[in-house]
Each structure stands twice: as structure tokens, then as C-alpha cells.
Amino acid sequence: MYILFNLNLCIDGSYFGVRPEKKTGVSPLQRFTMVPLCRTTVLLLLSLLSWAAVVFGYAPSGYRSVLGDPGMRWNGKDAAKPLGPRMQLFFYNLCSKAGFTNMSVIPSTKDTCTITKGALLGMGAIKNVASDDCCTACLNEPWCLAWTYWKSPNGVGNCDLKDNTVPQTIPPPLPRKDFSPRKGNCGLTKYQPPENCIDTRVGSGAIRARENGITSFATCQAYCEKNCSTACTFISYSFAHDDCSWYTECDLDELPQGADYYSAAIRQPIPPTSSGVRAYHHQQALPSPRYANCVVDGEQTISKSDNEAKNTGEMDDEWFAVLKEHALASKCALTDTKTRFPSFFWTVMSQNGNAPSSLGSADECLPYCFVDYGPRSNISGYPPAVNASAKRCINDASAPKTPRLQFNSKPMNQAKVMTAFTDASSPELIGSFNWTFELDADLTVPEAKFPKDKSLGVWSWRFDKASQKGIVRMYQRVSELYPWVCTYFGVDVGMGVKGNQAYDGRGMMTESPLAGTDFIVRFFLNITRDDIGGGGGIGSWYLLNMESCWNQVTGNNCRPYGNTNQNSHQQVLLDYGGSDSCTADEPLGCPVYHVEKNGTKIHRLDKAHFPYDAYKQYCCPCTSCSKCNDLNVPCCDPLSNSNGQSIYKIAPHPIWAVYGFPRNATDGFLGDPKMHELHVGKLWDQIWFPCPATESMEIITLNIGPETGYGTGTHDTEFFLSDFDVLVPANKASS
């Protein structure tokens, strides 16, 4: 009543001492700004409306929800009908893949070894141990599944320990001609400490020549022969560039023609003496990395056996993961005849960012990340887009010649998971998933007592009777062995291509909202922990990750199992953290254009007008958009997406604040809980794409969360979330 009384007086004009018709030239809006009590009244009214939005989750006039669980109301009084939480937890590796079933095995003290003479088993090497007992060395590491034994030139026994058992072909001896220097270099390298050329896992590196007494090709060769292992099987030398680079692999018949460089082999690869694998019971292998926890019509519909389903070898592991997702979704589905898709579940995606340093070579890209339809392939009978295309391999003859990515040579296994199923009979509807990538860790240990040096993920939820809504808690911690993990909560399109995936996935959205329409993503977020900083620029917090996908040649929206050499996922992420590679001094890390609200394009070299502070990073989908190569822009990592990928990292900034996004790095971040109402569809009008879509862009994934690196401190983050909804204009159709 107090607010209504004061509001009436302000509009009426009584605070001015005259009626409004006698107070000419003063509008109601001016009265609000001229009288302190009027301003206070309006602020109180806005606060009341904001509180009502949080508590009651109303949809703005003229909007409708496209979620099968609008606002996470569950059993709330204002829910359209009683609903329970429906959740899916899924994992993928750095290549956005489920990975091989036999790469994720819980170790046992009963495990033994099977030894094979003269064989090469397992791609890459996670660790090298000087030992003649490779079996013991392998069984001492919970992630080790295979090893290769070889003797160095000085007679010392070495064990290369590996996290997979993929058979490899022992390379034939190099021909004599490869030992004669020829013009060109074996590829781009980074300066490494000289002692790194002993580590066979690293793959390549560069030594500062003159400071190490190297002044010619011959002295570069002599240095490697004396100081390095077979990691230095090939060298490239340039006096002009003060560079003595070393490589484990090099295709001397396809050398990039670097100025003043000469390259050659300097030693024969040392063949393995023997290889072995961990011998374990098949029950120790982890389930296919899809898990669900759903309450439908008052019943828990997922069983323990549903979540424990794993591939027994009859089909490709990637295709099995797709079929498992479909099977779980069928038990979580809610169908509405008025919507395009059924709704299935909310999704948390968690990704282990580890990979061998040699990932991307011709041998290790296939079949680690992508299927090969050549002579080495023994996989068939499933849609090829599940594993994508061989053309993505960096050393493939038809692939763009980009430098090999230097990954961290740490285990690539999936996480072990513990599920606490939601009790449908409990008013609080409490449930959770706990997971860790440390295969020897015990998840039954309470969270507070779980070892701090182990990775840990927790996704829990409950229905809060006081506020009549569901509340989600997310917690993530990385470890020294698993130092880079992404974990995002959100929604995917009900059926079709979704974030980073080319297959026919399942999600919560009953329609795909369209970029360009004024659709809204709304949620209440409270970030309570943020210790996510790590090396290499890792340490980001995304609010929001917004994703679309279209064919870069035709401009049409992606459809499942499409052309992975032409399709590209377009990610636009507002990043609270992360590094800034878009600056006035380094504009090549920026998008080529910033688009103003009125459509005006500002070039990144226009230092007087380009808003560098509004962007953090841009990379182009070079594997699918031909225009990228003409624009002098960085290429996105070609391995970590089923299709091509484009990444826009935008920063908290007033330019985006007009759409409800954070104005600065503290707005809505740690210690500033708030209701966010983000006009995603209109923001996309200001994003420039080199190969634009020719039809309305469908938004297929919307999620929130951290990309955590291993820095100092506790290496963890925590946040609470509620009221999540996706609202589209009621008078406009989505896709």
C-alpha cells in the first residue's frame, strides 16, 4: 500500500504542490527524477518485481518457455503439473568422444600382465620409467593399460607407460636417403629446455642453437646424438633462426619450405623389445559415459543397470554411447503434443582435457579421435559423423598444414561415477552424481573427507519448499594428474545436433530458439567458490556458453550425421576469466569485425573505434570455412570437436550489458548472486561470422560453468543455480 500510495502521488504530481495539468512541461518521468521519494518508490517497486521474478518465476508478457521443465519448478505450487528432476551426466574426452571402453578401467591388486614379444601396443606414452620390469611399473599407475620396453643406446632399459592398448605398426627402418640433409623443416616447434629431448613423450622441440654451442647442421646433429634419446630421431637446423629443432617423427618427402632450414634423420628408430598389457576382469571397465537420474510421473525411471551399460565389443564405442543416450532419454521423456520435440533431461557435460603430446600425428589422430576408412580401419556399420572425418588429422595429406598441438601427455580416461538416485517419494527430491577421474579413488568417502589432491565433481539437486523451486549445486576440483576439466550445466535441443557433437543427441529444449529473435535465457546464479586459474590461459568461467551449428558451404543449419568437413559449431561465450588475446597491440586475436547495434562494422585495425575490451579471444573454423585462410585469423583447434569449430570469447562489458549480460568482471560473479535475464537472440545480431548462415541460426546448446586449470590453491569452483528457463517471443515460431 505504501508503494502504491507514493507511486500515485508521483504520477499525480502532488509532490510538486500542483496538479499535473497546472505544472506544464513536467512529465511523469521527470517528476520521478526530480523528487527523491519518487525515485525511492520506483526502486522499491523494481526490487519487488525482481523478488517476484525469483520466487515465482513468471514469464515476461508475450513470451513462452521452450523447456520441458520451465524454471525448474518440479513439484512447486506454480508448476503446470507435478514434475521431478530429470538429469543426464555425460562425459567426453578432448576429442569430444566417449573414447575406447578399454581406456577407462578401475585397477585392482589382482591385475597381472600379458607380455608380447616384438610388438608395439598403445599409442603415445604418458610416462617413461627407467626399468627392466615394465609390468610392475605399469601396475603401479592406476591409469596404465599397456607398456613398451626398449633399450636406449647406452643399454639402459626403458618402459613407455600408456593409457590405451591400440595396436601399432612397428615402423620399418628409414631409407639411406633420409639421412642426407635436404631443404625445408619438419614443422613448427617451441623452444624447450634442452633436457626435454630425452623425453620420448614430448614429440618435438627447439634448442637455442648458439647458446648451446651449435653453429652448423653437423653440430646440431652431434648435440642430439650425444644428449638426446630417440625423441630426437630427426632434426631441422637454421643458422639464420638460431634454431636446432628435434622431432620424433618427420615426413621428409613432404617438408614445408622454411627459409634457410635443412632437415634429415640422424638415427634409426629403436624397435621395441616387447610390449605388454594390464590383464583385468572385464567388469573393471567403466560404463559407457552416459548416466541419467530421472523422476517421471512420480517414479524414478532409471535403474542402476541402465547407468552401468557398457559396450561388450559388438559395436563401435562411440555408436554405443549414442544408443545408450537414446535409451536413457526414452526413460526420461515427457511428450507434449503442442511441442516439436519431447523434452528429456537437463545436462551436465564434463570433459577431461588430457591428451598425448603426439595427438594429431597421422598415426595418433586415427583412431584416437576420428574414424579412418583406409586400410587400418576395422570399424563399420554406424554413421560416420559419430567419429568425424580423417581429413581433420593434422598430418593427413589433404588437411591444412598447421603446427601440431602440444598436449600434456596425461591420461585420457573417462570418470568413474557414483549415483544417488532421486527418491520420488521424498518432498525434497534430493539426488546427485559424484565423479572423479582418478581411477583408484573411493567415491564412497564423504565429500568433506575426499582427498584434496584428487579430482572431484559433484552435481546435486533438491526441491526447496520455502521458495517452491528446484536448486542445483555444482562443484568441481582438478588435480595434478587431471589438471584441465570443463564442467557445464545447461540445456540442449530436444533432438538433433548439440554442443560439440555431430550425432542425434537428446536434451531439454522442445524447440530450438532462433538467433536474431529476442529470446531470453534466465536463471538465478550464486558463485560461491572460484579458484580455477591454471597455466596456459586455462581458467575460465562461462556465463553463458551459446552454441549454434551450420554448414559453412551451404549456410544451412546442421543436421545429425552431416558433412563434418563443412559443418562448424559456432560457440559464443561470455568469459569472466581467461586470458585476453584480443588487444589493440595484438589485434589478430580479435574477430575481424565488431558489429554495432545499427549494423555498422568496425574493423579490428580501427584502433580508435574497435572495442577491444569487449572481446577476449577469437578463432576461425579453418577446417570448414574456406574464408578463414584469407583473413589472417587464428585457426581453432581442429581436433576437439566432431565438426569444425569457431570460438568467440566475449568479455563482461557495457556493450553486452544492454542485453542483460554482465557489465564488468564482478557483476554477478563471486559474492554477487543475482537473477540474470539475458537477451541472447539479439546479442547474436552483433556477432560477425566469416562464413555466415543463409537461414535463421538455431541455438542448440545453452550452458553455464567453469573451465578449470591447475594453478595454485584449492583448484576448485562451486556455484548454485535455480530458475533456469529459455523464453521465446510468443508470436514467433522457433525451429
Image (cartoon, rainbow, N blue to C red):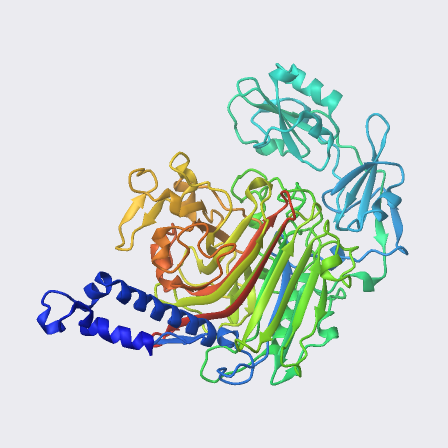
Residue 233 in view here = no
Residue positioned 24% across, 76% down in the render: 8
Give the quarter of the figure containing the N terminus.
Answer: bottom left
Position of 627 relative to 72 (above/below):
above
Viewer-proximal residue among 526 and 572: 526
Position of 461 relative to 530 (above/below):
below
Viewer-proximal residue among 441 and 604: 441
Q: Position of residue 452 (x, y in %)?
A: 72, 51
- How many badges with numbers are in the image? 0
Q: Residue furthest front?
A: 17
Residue 24 in view here = yes
Give the quarter of the figure containing the C terminus.
Answer: bottom left
Q: Position of residue 75 (x, y in %)?
A: 56, 81
In the image, taking residue 500 as reference, residue 161 lies left or right, namely right
Residue positioned 59% across, 39% down in the render: 404
Residue positioned 56% across, 68% down in the render: 505
Viewer-proximal residue among 202 and 704: 704
Position of 709 relative to 11 (above/below):
above
In the image, taking residue 262 as reference, residue 415 lies left or right, namely right
